[in-house]
Image: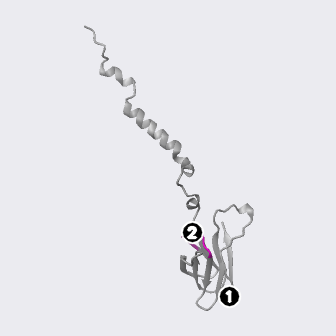
Amino acid sequence: MPSDRQPASGRSSRPDRRRVLASLGAVATVSTAGCSGVLPGNDPSSAAEPIEVTVENRTTSTAEIAVRVVDSEATTLFSRVFALEPETLISRGAIETPPANVHAFTPNGVARTWRYDPDLPADFECEREDVGLTLHQDGTIEPWYKC
């Protein structure tokens, strides 16, 4: 009596169910990988680059510059003392919360406080502007911002 069953070797040309499901899962994962920004629950402000603090020493001697960045409730977001050789620049930090004020001072009495209020031209297209400051030879501290 003939059997309607195919031999096991005849089934190999058809993909098994596990392989099909695994392939579909991989395709779904790859196709949604770039769409995480449109899913509910994502906070677009958390996706912005963190703010860095850049300090420049434009004097002819080694300088220590303390920098403290605070939010609107005076909570410290960043605090560091930079030791810089003459004519050098260094960046540090990863500030996630929008700052309100920046305080900078040196051990020999130079100090400056300013409100974090970048007013960069529209063609910069920054989500968050980095804080910069320069210590000049005349003892002044100049604030600036960059992308």
Q: Give the mark, 1 or 2, whose residue is nearer the N terminus.
A: 2
Magenta span has 93? yes
Q: Read off the residue under disc 2.
A: 97
Residue 97, image x, y percentages: 57, 69
User: Which quadrant would residue 17 be assigned to in this image?
Assistant: top left
Q: Nearer the viewer, residue 85 or 139?
A: 139
- Magenta highlight range: 91-100
Please name the residue shown 35% across and 22% down the image. Answer: 11
Q: Nearer the viewer, mark 1 or mark 2?
A: 2
Up-down: is 103 above or below 123? below
Crowding near pointer 2: few (<14 within 10 Å), some, many (20+)? some
Say which element carries label 2.
Answer: loop
* Vertical comparison of 30 with 130: above or below: above
- State the image coordinates of residue 52 (x, y, percent, origin top left): 59, 70
Name the amino acid, label 2. Answer: Thr
Please name the residue that numbered disc 1 is placed on: 139
Label 1: which secondary element = loop
Residue 90 among those drawn in magenta? no
Query: How many C-alpha atoms fall within 10 Å of the one at disc 1: few (<14), some, or many (≥20)?
Result: some
Q: Amino acid at mark 1?
A: Gly
**In the picture, residue 90 is in which quadrant?**
bottom right
Q: Residue at x 62, y 77 (%)?
A: 101
Q: Is residue 18 left or right of residue 93?
A: left
Q: Which mark is residue 40?
A: none
- The residue at 40%/28% (across/down) is 15
Residue 98 screen position, x and y as percent: 60, 69
97 shown above or below 137: above
